[in-house]
Image (spheres, grey):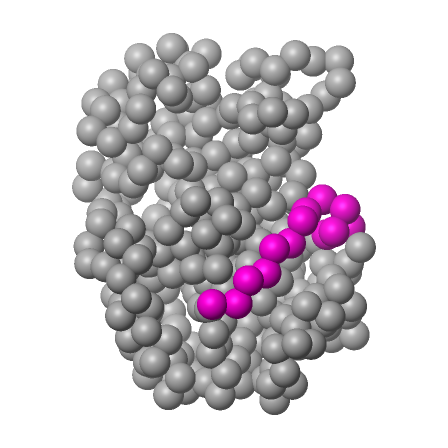
Amino acid sequence: MSDLILNSFKSPWTDFQLGVNKEKWQKSVQDVMSSEIFTNMCYLVVDYQEGDAYKRGIILNTLKNVPMSVADLVKLDDQKFDLENSATWAINPYKLYKPYLKNMVIAPFLTGTIKKALKNPRILVIGVAGGVLNNWYQTLPNEPIITGIEIDPKMIEIAKKWFGLRESKTHKILVEDGVKFIQNQAQSGNKFDVFFIDASHTEPGDDLNAPTYGFRSDDIISDMRTLVINVASETYVLSAYEKLINSYKKQFGTCFFLSARKDNSMNRVLVATNNPEASDREEFIGRVKENLPTIAFEHNNFYVEFV
């Protein structure tokens, strides 16, 4: 199947040769799609096995040879692993593989912004990608109201086709520029309890690959109880991290980083909150255990390290 797909997308694969290990991923390819808005950008959907786990990921030709979104595939006992079979396997929305994403999803529980008793918390996600974070939050019993913003419509097509992303009355996806969306929401008076930003440059830029430039200004964020940002750097220049967190300290009473370096990645997670309950860090992990549903712990080991 992968040979057929690659032959059908010769131009995208030529682009991928610039940045992706063809020998490593060629036999894992389920689909190839070209971005509708970014020049010379292509997305590879890959199914692969690591140990006893079966995974689906998205690889960009402009980034490293590491899937940007990784979801858990539910293997059927009577089927062997190959691309034809895995194409029909369901996504397990409870399982998280990326350490930085684990830190992102638990951050609102650390700060006390989301609790079991809070019905329909309002969540904004900028940078849906494969929809792994959105899918995870849709499993919560308190039925959060989720709005996902993604700038590239092709990414939403991939998320719906390959990652089980579904819209509902409590979950909507909009194809928009995230910065402009936030500005419009501020003018209209709409507010969210939690705001996730997982948006990176399409190509390496300065010392921070994520977030994108538009989200580094403190005046764009207001009326949020908890802000959670994936911060990525290939250079680990401390001054870049410090400049970013100092910017948000102007708007939020409590700001800190969570480390995601356990996966040997370039990610940290910035957490900023105006929740008055988020003053005692020693209580943070206790709040996670108290408010996360049991099934979340059945599928994940959560590792929290304050920076």
* Residue 120 visible in the current orientation: no
Horizontal arrangement in the rendering, residue 259 relative to residue 82 (left or right): left
Judge by depth and name the residue closer to the eye, 267 or 3.
267
* Start-end of magenta stretch: 295-307
From the viewer's perspective, tell me whether residue 290 is left or right of residue 167. Answer: right
In the rendered image, the vertical position of residue 169 relative to residue 46, given as above or below: below
* Quarter of image, res 52: top right
Is 74 included in the stretch rendered in magenta?
no
Q: On screen, 294 above or below 277?
A: above
Position of residue 178 relative to residue 48, above or below, is below
Query: What's the residue at 39%, 21% (across, down)?
Result: 25
Q: Position of residue 222 (x, y in %)?
A: 43, 83
- The residue drawn where x is 51% and y is 39% is 70
Q: Residue at x 61, y 35 (%)?
A: 72
Q: Position of residue 227 (x, y in %)?
A: 49, 73
Q: Quadrant of residue 276?
A: bottom right
Q: In terms of image quadrants, where is residue 53?
A: top right
The number of discs equals 0
Residue 21 horizontal/vertical position (percent): 31, 24
Q: Is residue 277 visible?
A: yes
Residue drawn at point x = 52 percent, y = 67 percent: 306
- Magenta span contains residue 303: yes
Of 166 and 82, which appears nearest the observer? 82
Q: Position of residue 229 (x, y in %)?
A: 44, 65
Q: Is residue 26 left or right of residue 214?
A: right
Q: Main secondary structure of the magenta part?
A: loop
